[in-house]
Amino acid sequence: MPTAEKLHRLIQSGVHRMGEIEIQTNVANIPFMLTHWQDAAAVNKPEFGGVEVHRDPAAAREISTYAEDGTYRFTKGQVNLKRGWLMALGSLEELRQALDHFYPACLGLFLAEEDGTLEVEFLRDKLQRQTGMYRFARNISDAGAQQLVRTVCGPAHQCAKRILWQIDAATPLEDSEASRFNGIPGEVPQNEAIPLLCREACNHFVAECRRVAKTEFEQKPA
Amino acid sequence: MSIAPKPHSALLIVGHGSTENPDSSTPYFDHAAEIRRRNLFAEVHCCFWKEEPSMREVLYQVDSDEVYIVPDFISEGYFTQDVIPREFQLTGPTSVVRGKTLHYCLPVGVHPHMTDLILRRACETAPDIDPATTTLIITGHGTGLNQNSTKAIRDQVDLIAASGAGYAAVLDAYMEEQPFIAEWDQLSQTPNVIVVPFFISDGLHSYQDIPVLLGIDPEVGPAASQREVFRHNPHHLRGKTLYYTSAIGTERLLADVILDQISDFDQIHKPL
């Protein structure tokens, strides 16, 4: 079944949230409306409460590139999506395109997890295949990596993804706010949201592993 | 070259991306939007090394069983020969990965049609100068990681020199290997010089690093889209008149070169 149809079924079953996006259907004769979840009421206001209105799903890229404070959101799981916009979309395919811009591949990852085909990559495997300047990242200790999860991942550090990976097959992540986060920012029941999944450590985490590995190396007694 | 519609196939445009400069990935999305408008493929997506979706994850958002992967890279090199095949788990020109048939095309930068794009960009930037009094320099990064990275530029130099475009000289120069772009004035014997950055995007290198090496900027400036004033041509520097173009990959017609690479792939690997 095509992804757009699976998305349709999810919405029909009551799903209305993905990351910081609220998905509303059939408001003002518009099939799908997207807003930041904190702006959800705008769809019912006259002239949408004055928020910026977009009709092209490709605008999602521009909306999600910078946070309100102007910082570049190079990983899209960050919980700093700016507010003050509304996207009015005419079809399921447009909805899918917009969500893929806001949260690249996240819908597909969730659907793959649902049908048991999602392949998770453990951190050691990810680090082992790094080349060039990131090759050194593989030298990070398990303790260093566990600590990094606490200091880099999770909503406290602006990442809303649910971590699926472990250090390696025998070493799960230690319990922390980051490792137990469910991938659903904002107050919404789990069965009403598409969670953001982290199937492998991101490039930012790998770069941090390299930094920590270098520090660990420099601090080793001669 | 025209391409027959592929309504059951997906196109994946692969780019480098950046964790520091959002302008870096803009051309890839522009090229994808241009091709999407032509309704040639069931789906057109972008994926990246440094941004999302990653090459490891993008296939999860692809419905089609047949996928053409085109590296929107300027040359054969470390990324096209090592990183992309590894990330997609490719085994050859055509690979079957997780039930999908992946066709791996050559990077856009090595296609002969890039020559037309460079000449067009040079003419647009310096429309009123006589090529006979002008040196055209194609500049790239240059790297020790893979020697092929400079080959695409040298090939273009040879093609333009033989094209009858009339430039007094056509040269290659690099940021990190000889001949160095920082010595552009010594490399050129003519009063006019056009420098074309052989990069896909106006990112760190073409709009921040190279202007410093050329002497246009005293120090590295902000990202291209954050600038109030873009480059003003010509620049009168070091006793010469210098024209500096934006990166060749920002050319809208690069979308055609992506399609050309798919067409070439089919001709070579999928004969009728």
Image: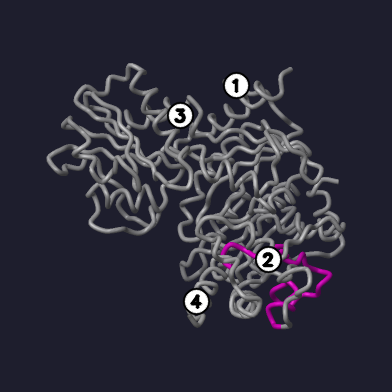
Range drawn in magenta: A176-205
Residue that badge 1 annotates: B2
Mark 4, other Cα within 10 Å: few <14 / some 14–19 / many ≥20: few
On the same chain, marks 2 and 3? The answer is: no
Which mark identifies residue A215?
Answer: 4
**Amino acid, disc 2:** Arg
- Mark 3: amino acid: Met
Q: Is residue A139 magenta?
A: no
Badge 4: chain ID:
A
- Decide: few, some or many residues near mark 2? Use Cα within 10 Å; few <14, some 14-19, many ≥20: many
**Marks 1 and 2, Cα distance to the nearest angstrom?**
45 Å
Asked if residue A48 can be seen in this view, the reply is: yes
Above or below, A145 relative to B175: below
Along the line of sight, which residue is nearer the eye, A31 or B175? B175
| Residue that badge 3 annotates | B114
Q: From the image, tell me which residue sits under label 2.
A: A124
User: With B30 as the anchor, is B143 left or right in this view?
Assistant: left
Judging from the image, what secondary structure is the residue with disc 4 in? helix
Q: Which numbered disc, 1 or 2, marks the residue closer to the eye?
A: 2
Under circle 2, the secondary element is helix
Q: Residue furthest left?
A: B239
Q: Residue at x 43, y 47 (%)?
A: B144
The mark nearer the N terminus, 1 or 3, is 1
